[in-house]
Structure formats: C-alpha cells, structure tokens
Image (tube, grey):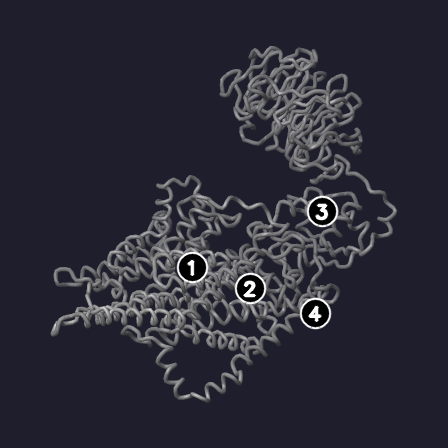
Amino acid sequence: MTALIYLILAACVGDFFCRRFYQFESVAHRCAAAILAGLLISSWFTYLTGLAFFWTSRPMVWANLLFFTAAIAVLSWPRWKRRIVKARSAIVQESQADLYLPRPKGSSIADWLLITAYVLLVSWMMFASFTSKGSKLQIANPEYSDFGPNTALMQSFAVGHNFPTEYPHYSGDRIRYHFLFYFQAGNLEFLGLDPAWSLNLLSIMTLVAMLVVVMTLGEVLFNSRAVGRLGSVLFFFFGSLSYIPFLQKQPSARAAIQAIKNQRDYLPTIFPYRGDAWGTWSQVTYLNQRHFASAIGILLLVLVFLVIRYRAAAAKRAETRAVMNTITAPPNTPSETGPASASGNTGQLEELPEYQTNPPIASLTTDRGQETAASTEAFVTTLPAFIFSGVLLGLLPMWNSAVFLAAAAILGLLFILCPRRLQMIALGVTAGLIAFPQMLYLSTGSGRANMPKLLHWGYTIDHPTAVNVVKYLGFTFGAKWLLIALALIFATSLQRRVFLAVLSLLAVAFSFQFTIEVLANQKFIHIWVIIANLFVAFALWRLWHLSLGGTTLPGKFAAILIPLIIIPGGIIDFFPVHNTGWSEVTYRNDPLIDWLNKNTTPREIFLTDRFVNHPILMAGRRVFYGWPYYAWSAGYDASKRDRVYIELFENKDPWKVYRLLKENGIKYVGFDGAVRQAQFIKRPNEQLYAAYFPKVFEDSRYNGLIIYKVPETPPAKLSSLPEAATNMFDGGRGSDKGQFDGPTGIAVDGNGNILVADTNNARIEKFAPSGTFLGVMGIRGIGYGQLGAPNGIAVDRAGNIYVADAARHRVEKLAPDGNVIDEWKGPDPGFYGPRRIAIGSDRSIYVVDQGHTRIVKFSPDGRVLTFWGSKGSGDGQFDDHTSVTVDPKTNRVFVADPINKRIQVFDSNGHFLTKWLIPEWGRSHGFEDLVIDSKTGRLYASSANMNFLLVYDLNGKRVSSLTPRTGERLDGPSALALVNSKLYVLNMAGNRVTAIDL
C-alpha cells in the first residue's frame, strides 16, 4: 500500500510541474506526462536523499520519509493555497482554456479503448517474462542473461545498502550503468511490493505512457488522431522481413502454423552480424531493458511540446501576415489567408506566401515596434517551458544515457531547422549543465576499460560498404521504407524537418561507437523507428483517403495490403514470449538468505562463481565479479578483473591470496560446483582456503556451496609462513614471481634449469628442475637489450641465452646471468616479428622471421650466414611459420608451417629436402612448436589449438600422440623443451609448465 501511495504522489508531483509548463492534447496525454515526469523527478529526489544518508544503516527509510514530506509540501504548500483561494474563478477559467488544446475530430472513447488494450497487452508481456512464484523469482530464459543482473541491482537497494552505488556484479568500483529505473523498482520493493510486481508495475506504467505520448505526437504532428493511434500500434510490429526465410523453411502452411505456435526463439535475421540472432529487432529489447521505454517517453514528451510550439509559432506568423495583408489590401479585396487557415492542416500554416506591402512609414514603424515587443513577450513567456524540458532531458543520463544522446542529436538538428532558437539554446544549456556531471561520472575513472574510437562506421556490419548498409536497413525495416517515402511526398515542411532531425539517429547508430559494445547502438535505431512509425501511419492514412479516378478503393486496398507485409514478424515474435521457459532464483524464505541476513552486512563483498543470479545477490549482497557481459559492456576493465579473479581461485601462495583478498575488500569466499568445475579456473585452490580460512557456511543444496570468511588479521597458520614464489608447475596468470601471462617460449640450460619467455610480462623467468622459482631476467622497454614481447628462447653450450623479441623485432643475446651481450636486427629489411630460435650442433643459430616468411641463419657472433623462404604454399615457402628445430646428428632443419598443415625439412643451407603433412594443423594462433629427441629418433609437435602432442619418427611417420600420464590436462601448449628424457610443455592458456617423463 505504501508503494502505491508513493506512485500516486510521484504522478501528482509530475502533474504539478507539467501542467505549469505544458499544454495537453488530451487527458491521456496529461496522465502520461505526469507518470513519466513524476517518476523521473521522484526517483532522482529519493536517490539523492538516500545518498545523502549513506552513513546511516537504512538510508532508504530516510529517503522515502523525506520524499513523502517534500511531495506533500509541494502539493499543498500554503502559498499555492492562498493563490488558488484568492483568484479561484479566474484561474479555473484560465486553466481550462490554456491547459488543453483543441483536438482534431475523433472519438475519445476509441482512444481509451486502445489504451486499455495496451495495458492488457503490456501487462501480459511483462509478467510473461518476469514473475514470482512463492519464494522464487522466475525470469524468462531469453531475457535471463541480459535482464537477470538487473534484479540484483534492484535487490541491492531493496534489501541491501548500495550507497555509494556500485554494480553488484562488479564490486569495489563506482557504478557505470544507468541504474535509476532499477533503483526505483528496488525502492517500491522496499515499500512493500514483491520484486516482480515492483518492476512490472513500473514497466507497464512507463511503456503504456510512452505509447500514449506516441499517439499524441502523431496527433499534433499530423493533425490526426488516426495517425497517432496507428503509429502507436506499429510499435509492436518492427517491420523486419525475418519472417520470410522462416516461413520458406516450412514444408506446408500447416507446418508453418505449427512452427509459429511452438516458436521459442525470436526470429533471427539473414545476417551473420552480432546480435542478429538474438531477436534484436523485436519487443525483447523492451522486456530486457525495462528502463528504455520510460526514457523514450520523456524524449517524446519534449518533442510533443516542441511541435506544439512550432505550430503555435507558425499560426502566429500566419496571423501577423493576415493582419498585414488586411491593412495593405485595397477595399473589397478578399483575404487570401482564410482557406489555408481553415484547412485544418496546421503544418501548412508556415508555408503561406510572403506578401510585399508598402504601408505608411509611421504605420510600419508602429507595427514593427509592436512585433518586437510581442516577440520579446513571447520569448519571456515560453522560456520557462523550454527550461523545464531541458531539466527533464538533463536528468536522463543516469536513467538511460543512450536516449539522452539521441535527444541531443534530434534537438541539435531541430535547432538548425526550426524556429525558437533562443529558447532551444536555453533548453540545451539547461540539459547540458545537468547531464554533464552524470556523463562525466559514467565515462571516467580509474576502473574504466579503454574505450574504442568514437568514430565507427557500419554499426555491427562486418563489411559496411554502402551496398551492405542499404541491404541491412532495407531488410530490417522492409515495406516501411516505401510508406515513409510516400509520407514525405505528402508531408508539410514541419513534418519533413522533424523527420530529417529524427533521421540523424540512423547516422549516429552507423557512424559512432559510444561504448565498448557497438550493439548498444541498436537503441538509436529503436527510437528512430518509433517516430518513423508515425510517418508510416500517415502514409497509410493518406492512402486510405486517396481518390483515384473518383474512387478511393485502390488506396484502401493498398492501405490494407501493405501492412500485411509489415505485421507477420511482430505476430510471430509474440509467441516466444508465451512459449518461453523459466530460470528461477530464490529471493526470500531461504536458509542461505536467512544466514546472510543474520551473519553478514549488506556492504560486504563475496568472491563467488560468475553467476547471473544467486541467493547471495538476492539478499542484497555484492559479489566481486559476477556475470561478466554486463560489466564488460558497461565499460568496466573486465580483463583486469578476470586476472585477479582467476588468481584468487588458482594461486597456491597463501600470503599472496590473503593480500589480494584484503586489497579488493573481499570478506567471504564461496566455493561451489561451478567454481570447482569451471573451465576458466584450471586448478582451484580450495585446499588453501580450507587450510587457512575459517569455514562459516556449508550446504549441499546450493551446488555444494562452502563459504569461507576472510579474517581481519592474518590467521595464525598464515603468520608463520614466509611469503613464497609460485612453483612453475602451479603457475597461474599474473606478474608475481613464478606466474606467467601468455608465455610462448621455453628452453633448458646446461644445468637443467628451465627458462620461460613470459611474453606479456616482458621477462624471462628461471626455475630449478623441481619447479622452484630462481629469478627473473630482462627489463620491459624499448632501449638496448630491453624486452617487449619475448617469444622463442634458446641456450647454447656456453650458457648464453638467445631471445626472439616479436614486439621489438630483435634477437637479444644475453649472458647466463642475464646481462646483454648483443642485439641482432637481422638482414635487410630487418626482422619483423621473430618467433623462435634453434641452435645446431655446429653452434649456428636459426631464427624464424615470421613477418618476412623466412629462416635466418647466424653464426654465434651474429654474422648472417644465409636465409631462405618466401610466402606461399610451394616447397620451401611458408605461411606464418612458427617454429624451427635442428637434428643434432644430421644438422637437418625442421620448420613448422602450420597454416599449410605441414613440417618442411631442409639441409643446413636451406635446401628443401622433404615435407610431412600434419592434418591436425591449419588453424591460426596455434604457436606450433617442434623439438627433437635425437637419442630415440623422435620429433614432438605441439599446437595451442590441441590438448595433446603429436609424435613422429624422423622420416615423417606418425608414431602416436602424447598426453601426460598423470592425467594432467594440457592447456594451450605453446612451446616444448627436452632434456634427459623429460619433456617440458609450456601451457600458454594455463600459464604453467607441465613435465612429461618419456
């Protein structure tokens, strides 16, 4: 009940402001404006008040108390009462005259019947995709991964304490997602509604309100109720031709009907681009992103206001011209403005011809003075409404930032194309001043990922040629393009200018990239088509009334036939809403939630599986790293969080783990089946947590969940341990001692020590045969002897180390202690991406110069002895060759040529001898490597794309495949090294070394 009172007060507050600045076409228009503006204003007020009371245990209590107080004060302020009492009759008469505009002919009953139908349809859509049953929330499967995380955002306010606000799936950094709509949903839950009802009620109210404003925009722009109604109906029918290939696949009409009835997925398009198989061009967008419709409604509300003002300006100019013509016209000359003014097409008012007159000088001066005074008075009287519109738009970025950008594009062109430019400047400045801090907050900060370039042509189209873009847009909107073209033929100047301004959204969608997820530009296209639907409706309305040869039948036939091409896709896409399955999550009356509420605080952070939803989130708690898509698409540095996350679950060093937990503010660590079996966590370190951290919760009903608590001070057992480096067999991704980041090279020195080229950390790490970390060589940089991206590595008999640096296009020669001896640039034109190094029995050094598709042979002192190879698939040619090795007995040179699926064999001078086919190769980025065991006459070949090794004899006969006998899984093997019947395999994806006894 309290939540409903809040909504009523919010709508009343919205009406309080809107009726002071706006005029309305209808009661429905007024109600929609009150709902949209009221929710926006009340949400901002409540949130900011809650933020001000963040230091209290329950800031939502204070926020709502102050909102109720402020709302009642605004609605019943004595000053307003005295004003109403003082001039009651005058205000009543004036308000009735000024508040509502004259409407085109039509039935208000029809309007309300259509709105009632919208309420029923939208209610079904919302509850069909999100509802509650008992103590569980049910989320439709197509919406789960996209919409599911927003329920956690709601719960963080409803039952948590999310002030200052963070994204519950990415704790420890400020929120970068427009969240206010979901804050309001959480607030309504806090006030007594269950989560499904709070979110669905907001969604229904705002989507229906948006549709009402669409109806109103069509009515004021085209002076026709029918256009407004039809344009709003077309919202549910996007117009894509996706249904055509779907129906073509069906063997019969009966099969097609059955397929439609059983359809569980939204129709994909014919394109292979990102998002085109997800139902992007269907109503799923408004089911996933519930805040989208309300923001569009605010934008449309402002557009309705502007169109009304533009019409009023045109009418004023026409009236002035009529007066001037009357003054200068000879006696008994009929007025020429009467028919145009009486036509009922207000859009034509601005196209009345200019008449040249020559009034007396005194009269002209007087008229100009009166006109200037009237213009100044009009500016002063209309300015507050424009400023109020700017306030509404300025409040949008935290509600939906894409709609704010769309508003900037549309209003920028309207400023150029339409009158009232001074007022538009005031609107823009107001909106900008309010929005700028929000945009700055969302788009800056230390935890933000690097953004792509702002200019990005082609949206999601892979090869965005003009033909492909036209093909994409043509298929996406289908027959609507024909009707839009027809509408523009019949349109007035104002209507064409509005369309041109709105058309800018397509240019924005296809020319810019504002977030790391370019698919997010679909919002601009959705906004465009909502307004374009009104032009489609106008064309159908004109066709219906078009008279050809004295009959309207052909036009009526066309007006019926063309929509039959538009609506099938929309009808089919209703069935997935009905047929979808559910994913469930418990949100109350649950043992885990009860334990969390009793034993933890809402601000504490949990390290858990990267789930979409979970009782931990439903309890209003936050997780260190949950479902990664939303964090990535919102602009968080997900790759950095990935590394820390994996290290926390893989690192075997207790001190390192404890320090990372404390640095990231993590209070609890949860292990369940998903963590233990996750593919991206190779070897979970649960034993470490079990040994050093107290277990505080365990319940097999939650996928074997065990929760460990991170103590405030190091545990006693931990305090007695020295800080240790990671063993190379444990490894792990990171930059600490013994850790790796994408390693690509490995070698063994004369003492049996293992050297690993830790590529992304720009260093060489040295380990004992036992795997113990010994030290690091190399410094990252671009100076002499410094490293950029070390790849291949080899050690000669004297212990000198040769490193192929693919980033600096050099080969570094290091002494056994790591000091620089020399730096080789290679023969002209120099190395380009050298990858591997091998040393022959005669001490010659062979380098894979991958970028120049050649092998270069050096003497130990760096003299170039020979080089061979070119790009191609012929004998002696290479295509991104990756490795070289030398048989010490014969000095034959073996080269891995994986794209050509082969190993080529040469003599020591580069003369081609033979080739072996390797059918398992052929994929890119395999970092294929070779190593020879001359004692047994075996060659071992690896690829990061395989989890096993290939074994050949030295004549090219396939002998077997090889995996570790211990059962350990190879994980992206990228390099091999052999010594004393022990094969070391470097796992690039697993960031560790595996030893195989041969």
Mark before the other along the chain sequence, 3 or 2 = 2
* Residue 148 visible, this angle: yes
Q: What amino acid is found at the position of numbered circle 2 in the picture?
A: Leu
User: Does the CB distance between marks 1 and 3 fall below 8 Å?
Assistant: no
**Amino acid marked by disc 1:** Phe
Q: Tell me the crowding category of disc 2: few under 14, some 14 to 19, or many 20 or more residues within 10 angstroms, Cα based.
A: many
Q: Which residue is mark 1?
A: 575
The reply to whether discs 3 and 2 touch (Cβ–Cβ < 8 Å) is no
Q: Mark 1–mark 2 contact, CB under 8 Å?
A: no
Image height of 881 relative to 518, above or below: above
How much space separates mark 3 and mark 4, taking CA atoms? Answer: 34 Å
3D distance between C-alphas at marks 1 and 3: 42 Å
Q: CA distance from mark 1 to mark 4?
A: 47 Å
From the image, tell me which residue sits under label 3.
649
Distance in Å between CA atoms under marks 2 and 4 = 21 Å
Q: State which tag comes first along the sequence, 1 or 3.
A: 1
Q: Residue beneath label 4, please?
A: 56
Seen at 42% across and 69% down, the residue is: 383
- Amino acid at the residue labelled 3: Phe
Q: What residue appears at the point 75 percent right and 59 percent down from the top-left corner?
A: 697
Residue at 32%, 53% in the rendered image: 253
First in sequence, mark 2 or 4: give its number.
4
